[in-house]
Amino acid sequence: MLVEGESDTHTLWWHGIHAVGIPGASVWKEERDAPHLTRYDVIYVVIEPDQGGESMLQWVKKSGLRDRVRIIRLAGFKDVSAMHVAGPEHFAARWQQALHTSIAWSDEVSTQAESARENAWGKCEELARDPAILDRLATHLPHVGLVGVEREAKLLYLALTSRVFDRVISVVVKGPSSAGKSYLVETVLSFSCPTSYYSLTAMSELALVYGQEPLQHRMLVLTEADAMASDMVSYLIRSLLSEGYLRYETVVKTTEGYATVFIERPGPSGLIVTTTRDSLHPENETRLISITLADSQDQTRAILDALAREDQGDDVDRAPWIALQQWIAASDAQVTIPFSENLVGLIPPIAVRLRRDARLLLQLIRAHALLHQASRKRDDRGRVVATLQDYAVVRALVAEFMSEGVQATVPATMRETVTVVGLIQKRHGSASVSEVAVHLGIDHSSTSRRCAAAARRGYLGNGEMSRGRPARYVLADPLPQEQTILPTVEMVAASIGRAEADVCTCAPEIAEHDTPLPNESKARRRTHKIPAWSSRAWRQDLQSRQDSATASGRRWRVRRWQGWRRSRRGD
């Protein structure tokens, strides 16, 4: 029996009842106190109708003993001592009645969730019934100072919604300094309840292991990727994302000598992180959806105009949005995608990374269906049924990111940069970052970042032979022909035997934020639709592309060697 305060403990002892008192509900220390109670199969906890009682519920919620706990509430009495004062001769009967009406912790959780769900529904019903919630979110963004990032904001909001699943979607937001990465993340988070995320600017190596803040079904938000630069922190985050929990065993010094302590931090959890780098550690990169903010002149102009209007103030009512996330968290997060096999069967297996990306795609569809569950049907098992409309919206958000992730296509900014380098190379033999920046009309830092990214992908090479001198970029491997990884909605509908889908089969086009590519023909910009080719055809096509790239790279290396020989001879 656990009670709050010494007087209640003495009262129970006087009546011959074994009890342990906690001198203030907030002083419970899990690692210190819990081991003393592990021998008991059932632990009764008396909850008082005040703030102290709420504190007791909070530590029970976080404790590893919670599955053994039964909650006792003393109807009509503040605490155990008050029940004794009201009539010592009736205490035994009243106490037995309290034990009889106690409820298991799991039932307490269900009761609280249902109450929270009903309360949240009253605040968000009108929003939850909107058939296009993400579009409604986009209409609020200009009023809170966000412009040109509608797609990115929608994707972040879907990732935040996915925290209720067993597999949570994680996102990295990339871009040059001052691109607005942190502001984008902070603004999207403001449309959700504070309990849905845990935000940090930095942490020690083992903070995730020893921390007391719950991580289960929450997003871990790091304002800069340098917070996970340590190998240990990076490893712990990868384990949390992949395994859905952390299990850590260490040795501590006790009064009886050294002893091992096993710490388990339950998940699942997701990650939202921002960075100025164009790539993270490969083991981390493949676990996240990568979003790169535009650095074009048009985007900068849009942001400057928004800053000039900032005196209008933030008048967006976020209460319905916060209630919506609370309602989703209290709901059953079971979603089925009846067309998942048809969809995955149409994705060409051209990269190993697609094994993870396909799972992320399905989770995004589930998140969108769950977000719109008030306007979705349920199957005979009570699961929300996703529709092709959910896929249409998700495809419009992530098709470009997924194609770029497996290098089936080249970002428009990278293609633009490589094209400009080619134009300068024709006149001067190579291109410096400053020359490219002048042609692109953007700052030196952003241009350097673009060129470095293209060089890492093999589309540019450094023609400068002297060490320590600034890079002189030249063309290397040819830009690949663009491929569309995700099938169209019509293709998916046709594959499941429908001539015409019974739901919306198109999503609004996402406006491009980048400047048009210079001197680029319509034929080159055209996105080639990928049919459901046979695996043999895919292998042949992939092999031909690899052969072409290898030959081109060989020719470039020969030209570079010949240039070096001529410079040595003084030609």
Image (cartoon, grey):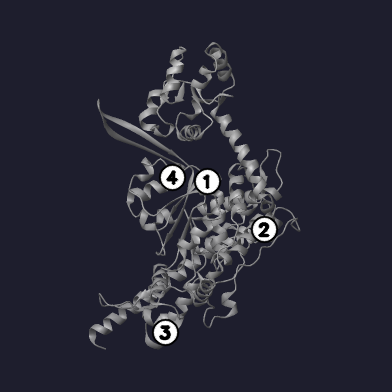
Give the Cα distance between marks 4 and 3: 47 Å
Give the Cα distance between marks 1 and 3: 47 Å
Closer to the eye: label 1 or 3: 1
Task: Give the residue displayed 42% in from the left and 86% down from the top.
Answer: 426
Residue 105's disc is none
Q: Quadrant of residue 482?
A: bottom right
- Labels 2 & 1 near each other (Cβ < 8 A): no
Dot placed on the residue nearer the N-terminal end, 4 or 3: 4
Q: Amino acid at mark 4?
A: Leu
Q: Measured along the vertical axis of the image, is residue 353 above or below residue 179?
A: above
Q: Measured along the vertical axis of the image, is residue 241 above or below residue 532?
A: above
Give the Cα distance between marks 2 and 1: 24 Å
Q: Amino acid at mark 2?
A: Ala
Q: Is residue 532 visible?
A: no
In the picture of the structure, the residue carrying the numbered disc 2 is: 132
Closer to the eye: label 4 or 2: 2
Around disc 2, counting alpha carbons within 10 Å, would you say few (fewer than 14), some (14 to 19), or many (20 or more)? some
Q: Amino acid at mark 3?
A: Ile
Dot placed on the residue nearer the N-terminal end, 1 or 3: 1
In the picture of the structure, the residue carrying the numbered disc 1 is: 167
Dot placed on the residue nearer the N-terminal end, 2 or 3: 2
Q: Is residue 55 visible?
A: yes
Residue 424's disc is 3
